[in-house]
Amino acid sequence: MTPDPKEKFVGIQISPISFIDEGVDAVLDTLQNRVGVNVLMLGTVSWLGLKTGRSISHELDGWPDHGVPEPFSMMGGAYYTPDPRYFQNTLIKDFRARDPEFEGKDILEMVIPAAHARGMQVYVELMEPFFKYAGHGSVNSIDIPNLAQCLEIDVYGRHKDEPSTSNPDYRRWIHGIIEDQVRNHDIDGIMWCNERNSPLDQMMQGQAPGDFSDAARAEATARGIDVEACRRALIEMHRFFQAARAGEDFDDGAFITFVRMLLKHPEVLIWERFWLERNKDLDRELYGMVKWCKPNLPFGLNVWNRNHFNLFRRAQWPWEEQTMYADWVKPITYQHQSGEIWHKEFGFFHKTILRDFDPGTAAAVMQGILGLNEAPLDQVIQTGMDPDTYVHGQCADALRGVHGRAKVFMGLGIDAPRVRADQAKCTPDIAYRSVMATYRAGGHGVVLSPNYASMHLTNLDGVAKALTELGLKT
């Protein structure tokens, strides 16, 4: 596919700190002139270093060839100035970032005028969960009074470590974050990311499932669900998963026992379905809110790669459904990093319901079910995933799934943070081939991810080479 330069969409996810470290004009010069970026995906509210900080993997990957080569003692919060009018109906009110580097600064006011003067667009990038997300450089403490009152409750009645998305204060706070920025700032779009683990996910990963907070219970009851029956069923399923992970013997093996448990306790799937729909409701609410405020403002979904690495999530999140509440989708395909992510995701299955099978054989079958054609399990961490099969294949899958009702902007990993020294590294060639694979599959654009602050300019040069060959950069 030969892309139309008039429809060019080359985005990059970027932290507020990069504009402090390097200066607004210098960053925009680099991204526009050296790389060919025309859309900034700006993290504005987060307590995660991956979204609003510097590199979170500098110990393994080294510091990039730009910016400040020092850890950022990020405190997190809103890096724009929240308008209190939009937070009157929630107990979460004071969440302005207190990092000294941002004192008296509003990142949207700093960046939008300069970007627009150059013909560049500015999208707000937001991701839920906002707090304490493992592997995303979470800050150690969250200085928001009363936030603990919004936490999920697990199946045993214990507080979990994430706010409940059913909690009205938490949900209205998210609504306020969106409406505030849409109404008060001249942004060009919203990118929303939803990365919550469902009850089934939680159990497979060794956690007790939720959410049984008062708000979630009330919502379930209103939908005619027997909450206590579901809770009892989930306790039994959680015990099974704990036994499977501990290596206990099952007369008919772990997989058959899992199926038997589902047939014996169908309330597990009733609660999974309820949780899933409430989770999707948040996405739908935000889409509708944006369209109410500014009907023509694009709203897109940054879609978790676990949705194509996990067969349950693959079934739960069809592309066609997402086009009902998204103008565009961004499948996350961080190719060099993804070998380890796939290995970890498969590991949840192999430690539980597939533990009786040879891991290499089971992983190959799972890849076949998911439509993946990548390196064997014992090599995939070191090799990563091939852009010509992985990026191209995921782009083709998404395009087929949206049926022309949404655009597909591929999320390409440029120096996505590694967690192991033997994990595949990003290279200019990987970056180049990822861009080319996107357009060869018919994709509408790319989003360089997950954070400019960790990207090496030499790898971004691979993006520039591809855009030049495609006629999208002069």
Image (tube, rainbow, N blue to C red):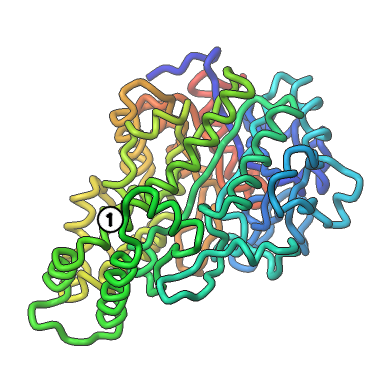
* Depth order, front residue of 72/89: 89
Q: Residue at x 61, y 52 (%)?
A: 170
- Compared to residue 73, the image places residue 225 above or below, namely above
Q: Quadrant of residue 441?
A: top left
Residue 262: give x, y in percent of width and height.
Answer: 18, 64
Q: Is residue 167 left or right of residue 202?
A: right
From where the camera sits, is residue 36 visible?
Answer: no
Residue 261: give x, y in percent of width and height.
Answer: 18, 70
- Compared to residue 335, the image places residue 109 above or below, namely above
Q: Is residue 338 left or right of residue 460?
A: left
- Compared to residue 177, the image places residue 169 above or below, namely below
Q: Residue at x 69, y 24 (%)?
A: 120
> Total number of numbered labels?
1
Q: Quadrant of residue 174?
A: top right
* Depth order, front residue of 55/356: 356
Secondary structure under badge 1? Answer: helix
Q: Is residue 458 left or right of residue 382?
A: right
From where the camera sits, is residue 282 visible?
Answer: yes
Q: Residue at x 30, y 72 (%)?
A: 232
Q: Residue at x 65, y 43 (%)?
A: 457
* Amino acid type, residue under disc 1 in the picture: Ile
Q: Is residue 235 left or right of residue 142?
A: left
Residue 52: give x, y in percent of width and height.
Answer: 69, 51
| Residue that mark 1 sits on | 270
Q: Quadrant of the C terminus?
A: top right
Residue 451: give x, y in percent of width and height.
Answer: 62, 47
* Depth order, front residue of 162/20: 162
